[in-house]
Image (cartoon, rainbow, N blue to C red):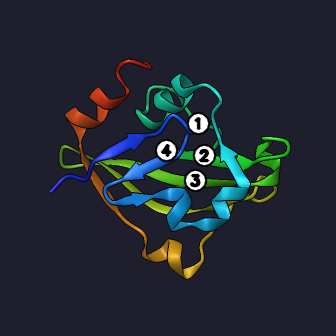
Amino acid sequence: MPTTLFLASTGDFHIGRYQLTKHFPVLKDWQPAHNDKGQCARQLAGVDDGPFEGWRVPLFVCRLCGNLACGAFTVLVSEESGSVKWSEFGWIADDNRSIIQDENMKRFGPFFFNRKEYMARFSSYI
């Protein structure tokens, strides 16, 4: 069954019954990675390339500088059998681009979204 996705006006993400900043409390000290919801939507929809290899999209960055060099909380987005999949939530540091995951992140997801509904969710921003 596809999961629901909602991007709150605060920049937080609601995935099914989870609110990212509540599920990962450390994110409260970070800010949404995109001041421009359009840029975020285009990256999550795969229309624009993100700053990382593959379809890995930053969701949250340093609250002080907003710079990816401080690191970013990211998600790997992929397509699978008519669905869009969010998986491998984790931190990425600009210096080595390796993914860092604690046990909570390793157990979180994957989430599958109906591709048509997923693209419709972002259509007003694309």
Mark 4 surroundings within 10 Å by alpha-carbon count, few (fewer than 14), some (14 through 19), many (20 or more): many
State the image coordinates of residue 11 (x, y, percent, origin top left): 56, 39
Q: Cβ–Cβ below 8 Å for labels 2 and 3? A: yes
Asked if residue 8 lies left or right of residue 82, the reply is right
Labelled disc at residue 58:
2
Q: Residue at 82%, 48% (x, y): give it.
A: 69
Residue, disc 3: 74
CA distance separating discs 4 and 2: 10 Å
Q: Residue at 53%, 32% (x, y): give it.
A: 40
Q: Quadrant location of the N terminus?
A: bottom left
Q: Residue at 77%, 59% (x, y): give it.
A: 96
Residue, disc 1: 50
Label 3 sits on a secondary structure element that is: strand
First reached walking from the N terminus: tag 1 or tag 3: 1
Residue, disc 4: 55
Q: Cβ–Cβ below 8 Å for labels 2 and 1? A: yes
Q: Cβ–Cβ below 8 Å for labels 4 and 1? A: yes
